[in-house]
Image (cartoon, rainbow, N blue to C red):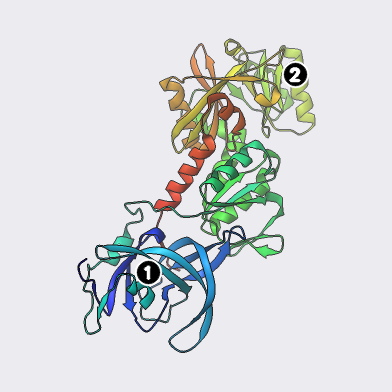
Amino acid sequence: MEPFVLGWREWVALPQLCLPALKAKIDTGAKTSALHAFSIETFGPIDAPRVRFGVHPVDYHNEIEVWCTAKIVDRRPVRSSNGQAEHRYIIHTPIRIGDREWPVEISLSNRYTMAHRMLLGRTALEAQAASILPWSEYRQEKLSYDIYEDRELAAPVKRSLRIALITMEPGNFSNKRLIEEAEKRDHVIEPINTLRCYMNIKSIASAVHYEGKTLPDFDFVIPRIGASITAYGTAVVRQFEMTGAQVLNSAQSIVQSRDKLFAHQLMAMHKLPMPDTAFASSNHDTDDLIKMVGGTPLIIKLLQSSQGKGVVLAENRKSAASVIDALRNAEASFLVQQYISEAAGQDLRCLVLDGKVIAAMVRRATGDDFRANLHKGGIAFATKLSAEERKIAVKAANRLGLKFAGVDILRSSKGPLLLEVNSSPGLEGVEKTTGADIAGQVLDYIEHRTFRTRPRLKKAA
């Protein structure tokens, strides 16, 4: 092996922490290596704890932040050069200097007042039998901080993520699958009860509180919010966004998809094909409302509904007028929509993730029910979509700003017609029907977004 010669200062990289360029002081007087870290917090199970921390990789500057996670291998007192002992978390991670890469033990400490963001101690140097020339510097390959100007680094680096699952039902199939898949990949996913969150709303340092404590920073947030608590649930998601967390679906996109009237208007603006739809406030408009959608039979939908609830088929004018009047008297908001008879109680459920259809199935109503929802006893089978159906599904999700969505489509004599878009689609029916690993693909997307979105440039005040 060729001699490994180092100066008193060298450029280093910590690839698993996504730190491609750091200046490190080579210090044979220190036993343990140290890395500058701030906002250090532990998470994960007791038997496999992890630490999450931020790093300012550029000396004397805090404009660039890189967030890292690593497994904790120890916590022990480390004595600094001024003689003070500090209990520090210890991690193992590979280091690269020049053409050599090897694992080192590193302690985490806030080194903001130090001249270098990293110190490389003698234990790490002994592993490579390094020779130190204290009168020289940068004997190995010189790197550059310019790499941090590229937000998307060339190669994504996998690490344990801290994920929040915002839900009222952590035990349902969809949430259990997401938890199972996250844990299989060595991530820590924490179910958080939506209604038990409360918010500290500030222009600086906004936070989400939960059970008497401030919630820590999360790498990613998955909102699974029930329709009945949309207003509060989206306020919670918006608060997480204010803390800088990435979210699967933004609060704004969820609000848009849940407001069926607004969603239909938005879809119409973008010329997406839909069944004829009408909306009115006054009961003097009932007859014209019915005519707008081609007469009876017709569908009446509550604006706030899901899983087929609040959807009624009115087969004649008398029953339509009765239901419309009853809803108006109850001050309920609703839409009136054309009934597509040739669909014969069938619709398509398309799952869209990041601009692609990842699975699709046909849902068919059973018995006398016209609703194809599986929660209403419908049956399902896998299907292949036409190019036009795929285009409509993707465009609908994109227009609402949803990264993950369930898009419902009817097959009619006029071609595919968009019914509605769901921001929290269930996974059970489509996974069991198609065999697709939807939870796995969602985690793939989360990892892609999180591993590649580095570093974060702090906004100027």
Q: Nearer the viewer, residue 293 or 182?
A: 182
Judge whether 279 appears above or below 183 on screen.
Answer: above
Amino acid tagged 1? Pro
Percent x, y of residue 284: 72, 23
Residue at 54%, 59% in the rendered image: 243
Q: Is residue 197 left or right of residue 437?
A: right
Mark 2, residue position: 321
SS type, badge 2: helix
Residue under pointer 1: 57
Say above or below: 451 vs 318.
Answer: below
Q: Is residue 117 visible?
A: no
Residue 129 rendering spot, x and y as whole percentages: 29, 73
Name the residue type under label 2: Ala
> Looking at the rendering, in which quadrant would you find the C terminus?
bottom left
Kindly identify the residue that appears in the image at 58 percent across and 61 percent down.
43
For the residues labelled 1 and 2, the Cα–Cα distance comes to 68 Å
Picture coordinates of residue 264, whole percent (x, y): 56, 30
